[in-house]
Amino acid sequence: MKSPALIRILCVFLITGLLALLPFQAGVAQEAAEDSLYIVQRGDTLFKIAATFGSSVEAFTEVNNLSNPSLIFVGQQLQVPLAPAPAVPTPLPSFIEPVLNLARGSVLAHRVSRGESLSQIAAELELALDDLVDHNEIENASLLHVGQVIEFPGLEPTYINAPWPEPVTALQTGPAVLQEGQSARLLLQTSRPSLLQGSFLGNQLIFISDESGLTHWALLGVPLDTEAGYQTLAIDVDDGERLVGFQWPLEIHEGTFGREAIILPQDDLDSLEPETERVEQELLQHLVSGFRPGRWFDGLMLRPSAGRIVSRFGTLRSYNRGPYDRIHRGVDYAAPTGTEIRAVADGLVVLAADLNVRGLSIMVDHGLGVFSGYWHLSEMDVITGDFVRAGDSIGKMGNTGRSTGSHLHWQLWVNGVAVNPLQWLHTDFTSLGNTQE
């Protein structure tokens, strides 16, 4: 087990090298003043500040003569180390240029394959069996036939009818039912070419516009701890003549999540140390704060493994008979060590490293703020900077890091928010019905 100090050094090294590949949305720190001073803000750590300025914890510690880099306080003035010459971003070959496709998609449905049951389909989609039965008017849930089409309730997009301010003409949300821990897409139409920006649940929304400047969409993730009820969506629209802002309440539904108790071997208890978890989490959060304006994912994502699901997103966890105070923010697939792990969509590898908690780990940037993570591998077949295609083998399943058996932890983020990956296996966020009927 590596020490927290070693993993911190690894994190700093990775961050410094990756800044050339991954743009960082600096929301955790203010820009440096003309005199190169930074005022510490609430929630800051020296790790975050150093990463924001493309520097390192060691450089900030030395230039500010800090005796303990973990002890900084709100309002403290820090001298920003002189930055080295900026690294030149690695150019991407033309064949992997991000694309933006706003074509209308097909109906959200599933065609029954041989051996499938309605209960299996409902479990995979995390939908209630009764809802599938009622929505599809099925008289006998045990009698399905190969090729039968099962439509998904609550996943279709919906247009919100309201007297929108000019130049806004329509607002669509998809899926129609928004739930904590899930992803959603907003589509907004304007009568004149416009630029949009917005916010939801304290997170910035980055809108992408088509060539006409009349159709705009943004992806959002609903955090797991979101309170059920109406939450405010805020959008600003700039058509070149005036800036119009409006708000709209979006209803968030409460999710249903289970519990599980895990017993770790004595040798792995160090991985539960708060400092070990914090440093690793800050590395991941920095990476998923990046945003590339184009996308490489297209259509439904692929399953990363042929293994069976043994732990679902949002499950509350207790370790070694302790309190249920940790949340599982991914999906676990179990299979023998050496089972192939595949990329769920096209993307750029932004992390391939050995971490304390997550073991051999890979992260892929799919564009538009969508990232996938693959933990506890036994082998990694890619390195940082590689470009992968959907279905490519990127590693082998294993039991590294904080793990009690051979499995894959698959994780997904949308604009910095951990979301349920399984939703992306049955919902095509690139074509959720882009034209109003």
Image (cartoon, rainbow, N blue to C red):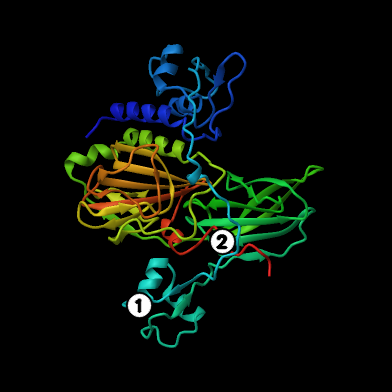
Residue drawn 27% across the image and 46% down it: 376
Task: Report x, y in % for residue 73.
Answer: 49, 23
Residue placed furthest toward the left: 266
C-alpha separation, residue under disc 2 versus residue under disc 1:
27 Å
- Where does the image place residue 268, in percent across and percent down from the top left? 21, 41
Q: Is residue 233 visible?
A: yes
Taking depth in this image into account, of 152 and 320 the one nearest to the observer is: 152
* Front: mark 2 or 1: 2
Q: What element carries label 2?
A: loop
Which label was assigned to residue 431?
A: 2
Q: Mark 1 points at which residue?
A: 117
**First in sequence: mark 2 vs mark 1:** 1
The correct choice, above or below, for 39 with respect to 179 in the image is above
Which quadrant of the structure image shows residue 382? top left
Label 2 crowd bin: few (<14), some (14–19), many (20+), radius 10 Å: some
How far across and down, in percent of the image, does residue 174 sit?
Answer: 58, 61
| Dot 1 amino acid type | Ser
Element assignment for label 1: loop
x and y, in percent, of residue 63 in the image:
45, 12
Q: Given the image, on which type of amino acid does mark 2 rest?
A: Ser
- As drawn, is 230 to the left or to the right of 340? right
Residue drawn at (62%, 16%) of the image: 34
Q: Say which residue appears at 26% left-offset and 46% top-offset.
A: 377
Tell me if mark 1 has few (under 14), some (14-19) or many (20+) residues whose alpha carbon lies within 10 angstroms of its own.
some
Q: Does the CB distance between marks 2 and 1 fall below 8 Å? A: no
Q: In which quarter of the image is the N terminus?
A: top left
